[in-house]
Image: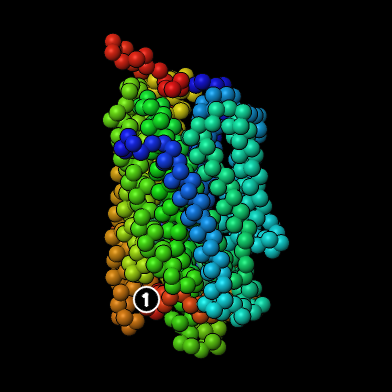
Amino acid sequence: MADNFNKGMARNIYYGGGVFFFLLLLGLTFDTMLELPERDHRENITEAVAHGKEIWENNNCIGCHSLMGEGAYFAPELANVYDRYGAGNEEAFKQFMQSWMAMQPLPTEGRRKMPQFNLSEEEVNALTDFLIWTSRIDDNDWPPNKQG
Amino acid sequence: MKFQSQAVAKPYFIFALALFAGQIIFGLVMGLQYIVGDFLFPYLPFNVARMVHTNLLIVWLLFGFMGASYYLVPEECDTELHSPLLAKILFWVFAAAGVATILGYLLVPYAELAEITYNHLLPTMGREFLEQPTITKVGIVIVCLGFIYNIGMTILKGRKTVINMVLITGLIGLAVFFLFSFYNPSNLVLDKFFWWFVVHLWVEGVWELILGAILAFTLIKVTGVDREVIEKWLYVIIAMALISGLIGMGHHYFWIGPGEYWLWLGSIFSALEPIPFFMMVVFAFRMVRERRHDHGNKIATTWALGTAVMAFLGAGVWGFIHTLAPVNYYTHGSQITAAHGHLAFFGAYAMIVMTIISYAMPIMRGRPQGNSAASQKVERFAFWTMCLSMLGITLALTVAGAYQVALQRLPEDSAALTFMMTQEKIMPIYWARLVFGVTFFAGLVAYFVSFFVKGENVEVKQEESTPTVCCGSCS
Ligand code: HEM
Ligand code: HEM
């Protein structure tokens, strides 16, 4: 680095830049907090949806699946599983989820396995409500197609 | 070693490496489960192996950072560590909590673990990388506070160099941002938004300060280059890291709910994030070229250069390839992400820990000029085997990811293959990944062996013109 660029200048860039961009981040965070209610449709977070999220977490579904593209890459994306199997029909999707969760693990030898979680009917319904709610978040149209 | 108390770093380093070995074993298990889906099922489901793999990674890196701090802060401060006893106690607390948590993952179903640890009182579990029971998280905070207190008091009473100021800033940031792991609202979007305050602001923020400080310290020691020059570089590098990385967080906000301006901000700022990593490469090579003495511990220098290069490849290059929103739209959450995650974590953080271990362990074992030539030779072999294997893993996963995008994401709804069908097609490439995983493990074994290779310790011959060569501790 050029000699006329000394350590003091470097330090000032570090402190100045660091503080400035940190404050900018705080500002943007604040702005996003104001904007989110229009995008995350939080008014639809019912007790069942909240309970569903707890069940999702307590069973570590994220350890195999991704949800909105984050998590693990071992098993299908689930933020759009409702779009994939529900075809807009919540009742049909609930039925699908009940039977899907009850069926696990599938017997196919050598195929990747999903454990049996022994969830009650009510719990699977809550989980399903959570997944349906998630599928309706405004996420800039991700994923590109139904397969996710 | 200049101060007796620096030796508390030793158990930290040894334990870190033991956990590293565990991490790789679980990685290999998963590598096989990707191919043979029912391997070890139902005894070790994939999600459990993954938690163990990633949590061991984070914990061993934290042990490594702590060891590094205990070693370098007293030397930089020119004073004994505030409390070696506290450091020893915290070691055992952290080790016990870590082992108990991993055993919890392995021995009880996760839902039961959540129940036993009263997760419902303050639900924080079940999120990627933050799977630890709440009580473990509290333990981590306590250990970090004790650790920062100890390091902070040492710095307060001693010399305040740029390196130890940058280091402690990074460590405080690490502790502060970890607090966001306790925020877990029922609104998934808010949950995810602040989850990144832990994960992103760690690896693309404050950890870069820690990385820079450890790298700068090691370079001063092995090259003898003037502190002024090194410190100037350090400032510029971390300045660029924060300037690009703070708003660069936007590249994680594209598809999880936040508004559209993040598509622009995230793309533009994160596109600048490779700059500090590139500067690290220039910096490291330049300092080594301008070195004022030839330290006998050659392999430590190799690790330092290797860290800069591999971090640039993993974070800089592999980060850049999927960071622009139009690209990330297709690659988000694919094997491309895994490719980048592996090379970046290994190249930047695993390697910086091995760099400081490579420099400091021989000194703590009474070999100021490094291990014997025979031992360094084995370590060099291990270095290359691990680095090349990790590049192999990364390339394999990149091909896998590109193929996945092509089959599953690019086509229209009707033409796209399902996730599971796509995975079937990728199988041969997962075999390649597994093979590189096995060679990586071989490299790791060689690395461990290098610690036990005996042989003549290096005595550096003195040439007339060069100044007396020492371990570098006094510069
Ligand atoms: C040597 C053999 C290794 C193998 C076979 C392996 C395999 C794996 C697998 C299968 C996953 C899960 C991917 C998924 O979610 O589907 C994973 C995750 C991960 N591994 Fe490894 N791993 C290895 C070594 C390492 C090393 C050395 C590091 C870092 C130092 C590392 C860091 C990670 C990280 C950060 C994740 C999470 C990735 C993400 O969320 O994108 N692994 N690994
Ligand atoms: C040493 C520094 C870095 C480390 C350890 C690291 C590690 C990771 C890991 C583990 C993930 C996966 C997170 C998850 O599981 O959801 C990730 C995601 C990502 N990283 Fe990095 N990263 C680093 C630096 C960078 C840089 C400098 C860039 C940009 C130039 C970048 C761009 C990205 C992007 C775009 C994603 C999102 C991938 C997706 O959409 O799935 N990273 N990183």
Image point (61%, 36%), residue name: B152
Quadrant housing the N terminus of chain A: top left
User: Is residue B129 something that shows in the picture?
Assistant: no
> Where in the figure is residue B232, as x and y percent of width and height?
40, 37
Mark 1 residue element: loop
Residue identified by numbered label 1: A144
Residue B49, image x, y percentages: 49, 55
Taking B54 as reference, is B370 above or below it? above
Judging from the image, mark 1 belongs to the subunit labelled: A
Q: Position of residue B307 (x, y in %)?
A: 36, 40
Depth check: B134 or B102 in front?
A: B134
Residue A46 in view in this figure: yes
Residue B76 percent coordinates (x, y)? 51, 28
Q: Amino acid at mark 1?
A: Pro
Label 1: few (<14), some or many (≥20) within 10 Å?
some
Quarter of the picture holding the C terminus of chain A: bottom left
Q: Residue at x 34, y 62 (%)?
A: B322
Tell me the residue at 46%/20% (across/down): B474
Residue B297 figure quarter:
top left
